[in-house]
Image (cartoon, grey):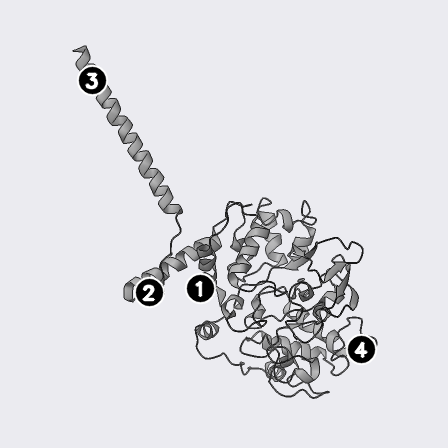
Amino acid sequence: MKSVRSRETVWVLAVLIGLCWSVSGEDERAAQAQSAIKGDCDPALLTGNAQKKCENERNHEGRRLFDAEQFAGNGRTCVTCHSKQTGTISPEDVQARLAEDQSDPLFLGDGLDDGVQGTSRITTHATIRIELQLPPWVKLANDPTARSIVVNRGVPTTVDTPSFVKAGQPGLNKLLVDGRAPNLQQQALGAIHDHTENTVEPTALELDLIAEFQQNDGRFFSSEAVRAFAKGGAAPTLPEGNTDSERRGRLMFLDTPFTPGSKVGICALCHSGPMLNQANQFSLPVFGTPPGVRFFDIGVSKRNIPTNPVMDFIVTNDDGTTVAFSSPDPGMVLTNPRIANPATPKSFGIDFFRTPILRGIAKTAPYFHDNSAKTLRDAVHHYVRFFNFPCDVDPVGSCTVGGLIELTEEDVDDITAFLKLL
């Protein structure tokens, strides 16, 4: 009997062990299935319900990657800095988050004043520390061996911008304020490396799904008209305006020849096209840039309202000539110095930045690459200084149209009123 009971005991133990192993194995396989990348189907190869299901799966996974995936980093996700409401963060957003939770992953590393401690900069300006590599043609005057610099920049909004990165337009649709990202995938990868500090590398599929999510989901569009345009529909037009102020503001965005002393079409020189983010055909006589250009120097770095640290640089052109300049953020000269005009020297890109899309701009404050304009009116008012000062006394240094036109406070109100309609 003892031997029988022993055999029964062994059998029961074996069954229990087998069950435990089975459950453990099933749990492990379930966990692996949950962690596996979803949406790796190709909707172009499918039709009907199968195609729709594939698209839904890809969008669902893209949303998860954007909103929740940390890539085993510092706790940040894409939505940490690119809010669902505005695609960016404002000082008010930052202040509210700090008051609610000081352990919010926004307040780590490049979100802190010196990268280690302090939140005065991010709560005042909502800027992030960005480390930029110096190209061979740019050196620091006081440290020629330095290969990188740190600048303070605002978070570029994801509203509308990701939807208009199209192939076949080199130099026009570069992303980020200095044009250093050629596409959405590389923009996402750079953010994951620099701001999320990942320890798990995203796959090519994951980067594609993040890009697709931004190009398709409704949160990334300022209006249904813009969303339809992104899908190949008709380009949105300028709203007519309901008040005299809005209608006067609209005149400044008409694609008409620029006449010194007139204000009609003055804003359209740089803010033309369906998304109001490119130079028009009349820009060449004024700025010397061909139609479609989306990078300009409007004196923001030179004014340096946030009082960011100023650095001294030397740019070496292809012909060996050098240009010395000082700036808190030199912009496009570090990345794509000839986007604005391929025939110009490398030094032409000093302090150039990407022209923002104006659709939905009223909802995406603050403005400019350094967040120096906290309100829409502040951003418009910057052009009073830009347009009004003559070249010989212009402290901003942007003298191309200096003294040719005078913007009044009423003009600022009119332009602001019109922009709120977009």
176 in relation to 403, above or below:
above
- Write down the residue under mark 2: 45
- Write down the residue under mark 3: 7
Disc on the earlier residue, 1 or 4: 1
Q: Gap between marks 2 and 4, in whole Å? A: 59 Å
Front-most of residues 190 and 108: 190
Q: Of tags 2 and 4, which is closer to the observer?
A: 2
As helix, strand or loop, the secondary structure at mark 1 comes to loop
Determine the image quadrant of residue 218.
Answer: bottom left
Disc on the earlier residue, 2 or 1: 2
Q: Of tags 2 and 3, which is closer to the observer?
A: 2
Q: Residues within 10 Å of mark 1 (few under 14, many from 20)?
A: some
Q: Residue at x 49, y 65 (%)?
A: 220
Q: Residues within 10 Å of mark 3 (few under 14, many from 20)?
A: few
* CB contact under 8 Å: marks 3 and 4: no
- Write down the residue under mark 4: 391
- Residue 153 position, x and y percent, is 65, 59
Q: Which mark is residue 217?
A: 1
Q: Is residue 18 visible?
A: yes
Q: Gap between marks 2 and 3, in whole Å? A: 58 Å
